[in-house]
Image (spheres, coloured by chain):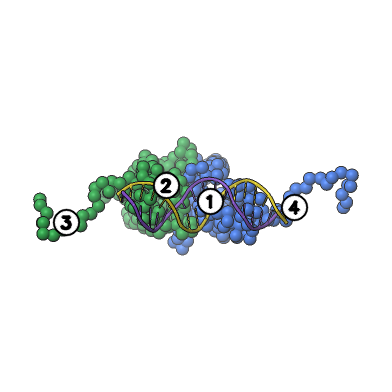
Chain colours: A blue, B green, C purple, D yellow
Amino acid sequence: MTTDPARPPARRGPYAKSRRRRESIVAAAHEVFAARGYRGGSLQDVADKVGMSQTSLLHYFPAKSDLLLAVLHLRDSITADGSPRDLSETLVESVMRQASFNETVPGVIELYTVLCAESLTDNHPGLDYFTERYEALRSSYLRAFAALADEGRLRPGVDPERAAATLVALWDGIQTQWLMAPELVDMAGCLRDYLELVVLPE
Amino acid sequence: MTTDPARPPARRGPYAKSRRRRESIVAAAHEVFAARGYRGGSLQDVADKVGMSQTSLLHYFPAKSDLLLAVLHLRDSITADGSPRDLSETLVESVMRQASFNETVPGVIELYTVLCAESLTDNHPGLDYFTERYEALRSSYLRAFAALADEGRLRPGVDPERAAATLVALWDGIQTQWLMAPELVDMAGCLRDYLELVVLPE
DNA sequence: GTCTATAAACGGATAGAC
DNA sequence: GTCTATCCGTTTATAGAC
């Protein structure tokens, strides 16, 4: 493969090495923000972990808030939000699979729990992300519960909208308790119990 | 009432004025920590709000962490934790009353949600408080559900221990959603729905 | 792209005058 | 009890050499 000598080289995207560098920075920031939060974690902490200077880090992410957003969007691609793997997977199966998976990935639950609440504080760069995420989650589960209701498989009296908010709330809340006392709290069990209470067997 | 002139005046406790000063500091810190978190809120913020210098503030609370603990324990005395007002009040009534009350007190829900998650980060002075609080809440609701089970008023198949953790989790989680979108989330409705699903009518 | 140097601001906490 | 002055560490971010 040769380069046309008559014109200057076409603008190239970032080199592979640079992309890997960015990824390692985001991974380090994921660890730091999960352990100390956004305000409590410093760029120096991230730089130390990835083995570069704090100023070099700012070459990749011009501001600390850019790094936060990169971490949050990386999290999305890791967890894929519990959306059904295929059309045959039921709501219960998909929730249980996602919950069990998250438990195995170090730091994801910490990151989510810590940053979500922190985003409620003044001028936090993560607020929009979490607000939109909640709306998306609620509407996704609303659709799932509404579909079950159509099949007559939602327990009578259960409101699909409130059930969606409840499922999301329960999931978040049980993660917090699990982080404080992993041996005392059965995350998957609580989620399954609730879903089996609300969704009637086929 | 006279003072014995033969001995020096007995050591007196803090003056009433000093006690009120402490209370106003704690109230200001409550606002600051609710709005910015513990790490994000500074002693200067609190001092400004109460109208004194940052160093004078440290005369009352030798360290920032002491101020945090004072705020957390003040919160307990405000909310009284949803424990039954009297023996005739049912679990459902007590939860609903507490949830509705919290909604009316500015900042309590913010404070709790923000500090609870933040306490999961490294070396946070609030972790013990929240860990103990969760254990107390779970065991309190466990007793309530167990008592209902004895009366045959717990839905068959419901495990009292998991139901206790679930109630606490749901409550926390729905507060987070409510803080992000108060008009979209019905806190009291979700709590009532869950309890009516689990507790059979008398 | 990576670094050193440094700016510019802010943090909690201490010493000591009044 | 309240203050000013100050210590000393840390923060994000910029400038510019290499």
Q: Numbered disc 2: what chain?
A: B
Q: Where is residue B39? Give x, y as percent.
A: 46, 51
Residue at screen point 56% across, 60% down? A106
Q: Is residue A103 left or right of residue B132?
A: right
Amino acid marked by disc 3? Pro
Closer to the camera, A195 or B63?
A: B63
Closer to the camera, D1 or A50?
A: D1
Q: Numbered disc 4: what chain?
A: A
Secondary structure type for disc 2: helix
* CB-based contact (under 8 Å), mark 1 and mark 4: no
Q: Nearer the viewer, mark 3 or mark 1?
A: 3
Q: CA distance from mark 3 to mark 2?
A: 37 Å
| Circle number at residue A38 | 1
Amino acid marked by disc 2? Gln
Residue A30 appears in the figure = no
Dot 1, crowdedness within 10 Å: few (<14), some or many (≥20)? many
* CB-based contact (under 8 Å), mark 3 and mark 1: no
* CB-based contact (under 8 Å), mark 3 and mark 2: no
Residue at screen point 75% across, 52% down? A15
Q: Nearer the viewer, mark 4 or mark 3?
A: 3
Amino acid marked by disc 4? Tyr
Tell if the residue under mark 1 belongs to the same chain as the one under mark 4: yes
Residue under label 2: B44
Residue under label 3: B9
Dot 2, crowdedness within 10 Å: few (<14), some or many (≥20)? some
Please tell me which of labels 1 and 4 falls first in the chain. Answer: 4
